[in-house]
Amino acid sequence: MGNEPCADNYGPVNVMELRERIFQETEREKAQDYLWNELVLLQSQTFRTVKGLEYTYQIRGNEMFVSRKTKSITKASVDLALEKIIELSGKVAGPKKLKCFGASYLYPIFIEMGLIKNSPFFIERAKIR
């Protein structure tokens, strides 16, 4: 994931624009929509948890189904995680800091999206690339 254009209900965006929109958006609902639309575009991509476990996810309605879980992660949980990211200005030290169900799966996705930058996991991934 780099600066590939992404389509959303508010026009095409790239990763940097997505981050700016989310962090600068005064209407939380719009920021949540930007994020959810990006999650829809990234489904089926392979991610790795902090512990290195591979997974993919599918979005159906307002739920995210992760390949390694039987329970879904709701859009409400994703919205809670986004609130925490914004509250911490994107400086989230680990999945537990998101304080929501499914954090271990959401955290690497948010790193890939550029929403979380100053985490040990992000720094380690940057070294590999």
Image: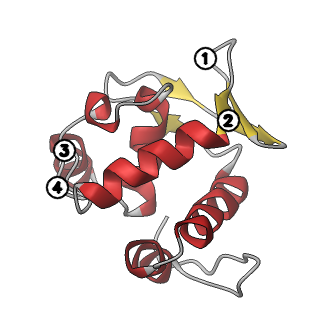
What separation in Å lies between label 3 and label 4 (alpha carbons)? 11 Å
Q: Which residue is mark 2?
A: 57
Task: Give the image location of residue 86, x and y in percent.
Answer: 33, 60
Kindly identify the residue that appears in the image at 24 percent across and 35 percent down. 94
Kindly identify the residue that appears in the image at 63 percent across and 46 percent down. 45
Which class describes the residues within 10 Å of circle 2: few (<14), some (14-19), or many (20+)?
many
Kindly identify the residue that appears in the image at 48 percent across and 31 percent down. 105
Element assignment for label 1? loop
What separation in Å lies between label 1 and label 4 (alpha carbons)? 26 Å
Task: Give the image location of residue 93, x and y in percent.
Answer: 17, 41
Mark 1 and mark 4 in contact? Answer it, CB < 8 Å.
Answer: no
Q: Is residue 126 above or below residue 56?
A: below
Please tell me in which quadrant of the rendered image residue 98 appears: top left
Q: Amino acid at mark 3?
A: Glu
Task: Give the image location of residue 80, x and y in percent.
Answer: 47, 43
Single out the mark in the foreground, 3 or 4.
4
Q: Which mark is residue 118?
A: 4
Please tell me in which quadrant of the rendered image residue 40 appears: bottom right
Name the image colouring: secondary structure
- The quadrant of the rendering that contains the C terminus is bottom left
Q: Nearer the viewer, residue 70 or 33?
A: 33
What separation in Å lies between label 2 and label 4 (alpha carbons)? 24 Å
Which class describes the residues within 10 Å of circle 1: few (<14), some (14-19), or many (20+)?
few
Earlier along the polypeptide chain: callout 1 or callout 2?
2
Kindly identify the residue that appears in the image at 29 percent across and 27 percent down. 96
Q: Which residue is mark 1?
A: 68
What separation in Å lies between label 1 and label 2 (alpha carbons)? 9 Å
Element assignment for label 4? loop
Q: Amino acid at mark 4?
A: Asn
Q: Which residue is mark 3?
A: 124
Earlier along the polypeptide chain: callout 2 or callout 4?
2
